[in-house]
Amino acid sequence: MTSFTRADGRAPDQLRPIRITRGFTTNPAGSVLIEYGNTRVMCTASAEQGVPRFKKDSGEGWLTAEYAMLPAATHERMPRESMRGKVKGRTHEISRLVGRSLRAAIDLTLLGENTINIDCDVLQADGGTRTASITGAYIALADAIAYLTAQGVVPGNPLLPPIAAVSVGIIDGHVCLDLPYEEDSRADVDLNVIMTQEGKFVEIQGTAEHNTFSRDELNAMLDYAEKGCKELIEAQLASLGK
Amino acid sequence: MTSFTRADGRAPDQLRPIRITRGFTTNPAGSVLIEYGNTRVMCTASAEQGVPRFKKDSGEGWLTAEYAMLPAATHERMPRESMRGKVKGRTHEISRLVGRSLRAAIDLTLLGENTINIDCDVLQADGGTRTASITGAYIALADAIAYLTAQGVVPGNPLLPPIAAVSVGIIDGHVCLDLPYEEDSRADVDLNVIMTQEGKFVEIQGTAEHNTFSRDELNAMLDYAEKGCKELIEAQLASLGK
Amino acid sequence: MTSFTRADGRAPDQLRPIRITRGFTTNPAGSVLIEYGNTRVMCTASAEQGVPRFKKDSGEGWLTAEYAMLPAATHERMPRESMRGKVKGRTHEISRLVGRSLRAAIDLTLLGENTINIDCDVLQADGGTRTASITGAYIALADAIAYLTAQGVVPGNPLLPPIAAVSVGIIDGHVCLDLPYEEDSRADVDLNVIMTQEGKFVEIQGTAEHNTFSRDELNAMLDYAEKGCKELIEAQLASLGK
Amino acid sequence: MTSFTRADGRAPDQLRPIRITRGFTTNPAGSVLIEYGNTRVMCTASAEQGVPRFKKDSGEGWLTAEYAMLPAATHERMPRESMRGKVKGRTHEISRLVGRSLRAAIDLTLLGENTINIDCDVLQADGGTRTASITGAYIALADAIAYLTAQGVVPGNPLLPPIAAVSVGIIDGHVCLDLPYEEDSRADVDLNVIMTQEGKFVEIQGTAEHNTFSRDELNAMLDYAEKGCKELIEAQLASLGK
Amino acid sequence: MTSFTRADGRAPDQLRPIRITRGFTTNPAGSVLIEYGNTRVMCTASAEQGVPRFKKDSGEGWLTAEYAMLPAATHERMPRESMRGKVKGRTHEISRLVGRSLRAAIDLTLLGENTINIDCDVLQADGGTRTASITGAYIALADAIAYLTAQGVVPGNPLLPPIAAVSVGIIDGHVCLDLPYEEDSRADVDLNVIMTQEGKFVEIQGTAEHNTFSRDELNAMLDYAEKGCKELIEAQLASLGK
Amino acid sequence: MTSFTRADGRAPDQLRPIRITRGFTTNPAGSVLIEYGNTRVMCTASAEQGVPRFKKDSGEGWLTAEYAMLPAATHERMPRESMRGKVKGRTHEISRLVGRSLRAAIDLTLLGENTINIDCDVLQADGGTRTASITGAYIALADAIAYLTAQGVVPGNPLLPPIAAVSVGIIDGHVCLDLPYEEDSRADVDLNVIMTQEGKFVEIQGTAEHNTFSRDELNAMLDYAEKGCKELIEAQLASLGK
């Protein structure tokens, strides 16, 4: 392998600067601005009484999530999905991913028949918006649960230990952690990994964007992802004052 | 008239604290966070080459605007319009108002065949989101025009002097300037006024929410609106360093 | 000011010929054809038992309105909104205006838990369709209330005194009342005013289409609007045999 | 067969009173109000240059049609299709029927590359709205063609001899012509027939609403339909002054 | 009449080879693959408890049907209707026809408050897809009723004797039964007939695609249709082992 | 680990019976019925001239895919997406996965400016519909390419060696290959793997449905997936006569 330098000077296994701002807005039970470098996502967790029909009378709660990009978040402005009248497949896909992942961070049986709505709205996009969304949404969820518990709405303590998410890719044959847009757009492989505090996988999604990848390359990427998720969870715990 | 106190202690003709943050995000040509008290709106202006069909080969440019609320902007989370598949009448109405108003602040004949897209996304709503959107969008427009001029894309200087917008209402018989949500929801009359720097009207919209209003009451409201718009335009000019 | 002649020979403060035909169709509780010159709108008021969810168990009724143009109402045929699958912002905006205005002409607490649906369908458009809709819908509402009262469905008498609506504009520096399409399309300012019988405002909407307007100009326009609304209310009362 | 009396006193093979008002509105090239008893349909024919893509460069024209009911046309108000965001199957079906039928009354090769848009909007519904639409649309088409010819837009004379449409049904075992709503809703069989002036079929649609029907019953219905269409074509010719 | 040969060598009054495969898939209560020559339609009948709102508490059941083409069923792939977000008028029209026809083959008063959903999905289209759908759906319905009866869900025996459907057309002046796509696309007239076992009509739909048709031609077509439906009903009965 | 028996008696690393039927329908360039046990998917590949706008004048081709379930494919009938007017997130997600995967099996630079449309329609669902779709679509693609090559439409040979897809899961602590619905619905982890003939990954998607999973468990699942994909590719090659 020849020497390889990233445009922003990071080491291959180094995260971008991570910033977590709690209480970013005041109306939702939890509201967080998370930044992975220039990627900035507003993550909120709102609670409402009752559950969707398929959970009715189950005694359990539910958590659902919606992800969206503001039209001016990207370099070229994108048409607003509400005006197109259709949600893009990519948006649906990420919303479903965020919801599934966050459900791994909450014990629905202890939530009572309440629904948590996670909203992840990308204010500025520079790669890794889905991973930032998940990592940030966990903090918003934690704040919302604390609020609901303080209100006496939630019977037990449904919050599970943190989960965090990061992307890894292969660029010109080099494994790199936490890709900004410039790297993401030319990566041969793109892998998103969501992990728990104890190092178990919640979800892995690896895609050969321009080139297939071997078992060895997968393993190298997973090593980086594990390191990244650990550091992100440390940032989450620090933000929560734990 | 009996003595009357506003919940936030303001004088009847006093604006909420106004904050304007330029360069709030980096991708659009102009990006502004404007705050009227707790109301916070991200206003962006993006430029693209070409114009809609009805302006083709006119030699002129066009400006259009879209307004939206993030789902968690309000006290109770609102369903996301893209997921409902329909844009609400209120959203359409405000988008059209913002577009019309901003077109009064630009000379389209000097813009060349370019289109400016204004996006006003409400991050936190506490009354007056449409007026904050217009006032903030002017700054985003100014920054976008400066950018386009620097790029050599725009032939002349299409930016006109500032416009600003404010609401006035009648609450329990008292005229009040710049209503937060708590006042707005119980106002008898709600008037939105958009004015130019020289004190002319761009648009006035007065609605008897719970009670009709007399010509005298209209005049009293217009006096307050004029004062409010003047102060807002001073804030705009200060923000632009003029 | 130089001498100024309107294309149809009217004085600046003169309405077009107003015609009101009650009982235009027989199925709805109230059905009116209203004509402002060549503008012809069919206004109906239909009653149904029950109220929307947000009014349930309030003991009060509700009134809602929908405005639409037939595709061939305009000089150039317009695509049918049902076929486009989307309602235009302009349509939404006018429907909301008609509904708000008519709710100022009815005491919902005396309507019982019934809903009145106002439909304003423009058969032929020549400017002022929204103002004709409001003036005509009041008559349809009056007839529907009379019908419901005769049926014993409505407990009290919820009908309030008449409201009427008219447009005023500034054309080549001249204030003109009740603009037909030819004037409306080149007016610098367009003001729609909805007033009650006692001369109070229900709604005012003034827009600088091509030029901003001063406080003095606003006052001149309001004077004309007041005169126009008075005459329209006389026509309404005559039509109702009062 | 026992003696049988129709609610409106008509003979079994008698049409309702037919009224045709040409020039009902002034903007479209052809505009007709047609009445079959209490059923009233506004039929317009608008012309535009150019043809849909599948006819491009064919040298031929095209004709398309849209049918709709105003919400208050029926006894119980129906939701407006534009607000539902979906056109009902029944509406699509009738629009297609009207279009197909009218294309049998025009020689598209003589129309030049122009498109005729037929709009049939039901103002008041009392059975037979689709048949009244077709009969009325022929007159609107004739007026539009005359207008286009006078304008020099249409090279030849594309109008073919009249077509007309009528419904026949079986009620309590009795064949009846031109059913109003009260009869239509309890008919065992409903047959719609569109014929040319020379007595040929353009379309027949027979449906066993509550009971199947025999070949003999079909023949009896077709006899009545033929008589009805002849009389309708006479009314068309009289209206056109031929 | 000159001698006339069909491309596939059939006699003018001869059906294409008919194949009926019961139990084509295993999840629905009834599942049939029906083939009219190269036209292949999968027809299923699924049962669910309960009825639509307009049938609630009627003690009766309901039957509804949906028809669709797979995108690759036709020679040129057609866009998928779910992706367009709109169902085509043709699809609506056929779905309604299939539903109406099948309701003539079931006594809804004996079905209990259950709903039968018929789905007809065209795997391969070669003309006559709507008629094949109806004929095949009857078998799927019969199997579903037998299943529901065996389950003890259905109180009585709601299945009525068979119905079948076939197309007839006039090509170059010759009446032909059961048109494949090649004939259908150039037929002057297209008639679809749905009949019962005792030879009564459920529905007839005749359309002059390129030429009007006389009463004599209609009679000749109906004779062929009657012959075709008889043979189809024999095939149905054989398939059901009756 | 205790002894563990699968409901269908298969060994943990054993595929269900795989059946591939080429030429299942005749209109598309490639048409395949693939069966993984009771899961049956019709996969077609249709070719059209030209490419989407973002590929215009690139000299390259494009491949896109759509996946859908017939309403009666599942145990309980599901509403038809075209009738709902919205495509579900799951459908979008799988369509995108199929498209991405198949693009790894074709060299778009050798396809010329043509577009391949892959359609995967599930006739019967019993788990693994997305993996069966991918494996089957490769065969349809191969047949379509052969057809295009024979037609002289495609300049080079764009087909790459086979790809295949399979699911693996963890059920009660046991890793199992190729899950039917009964296993899939209670699996703790669900991993879908798409591989090339040379054993490289095209895509991996692993989801902790009810339980997170360790790196060791991931490795065990990947071993099974590799074995499964190898066998599927053998079946593909056999089907293609290679």
Image: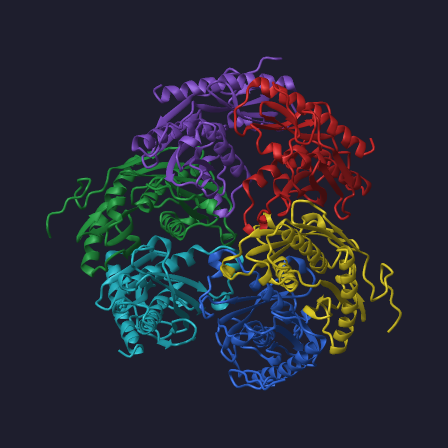
Chain colours: A red, B yellow, C blue, D cyan, E green, F purple
Seen in the picture, residue C77 relative to F221 is either above or below; the reply is: below
Q: Decide if residue D21 is in sight here.
A: yes
Specify the quadrant that holds the C terminus of chain E.
top left
> In this orientation, does residue F9 appear?
no
Q: Which residue is drawn at 50% across and 28% down?
A: F127
**Residue A185 in the image: x percent, y percent?**
58, 34
Q: Residue B107 location, x and y as percent? A: 62, 63
User: Between A146 and C187, which is closer to the camera in this rendering?
Assistant: C187
Q: Is residue A132 left or right of residue C95?
A: right
State the residue in front, A199 or D158. D158
In this view of the protein, which residue sits in the foreground, C87 or B40?
B40
Along the line of sight, which residue is nearer the eye, D90 or F214?
A: F214
User: Residue placed at 43% from the left, 48% from the top?
Assistant: E64
- Give left or right: position of B104 versus D218: right
Name the image quarter holding residue F218.
top right
Which quarter of the figure has residue B1? Answer: bottom right
Question: Which residue shows up at 72% across the image and 35% down it?
Answer: A138
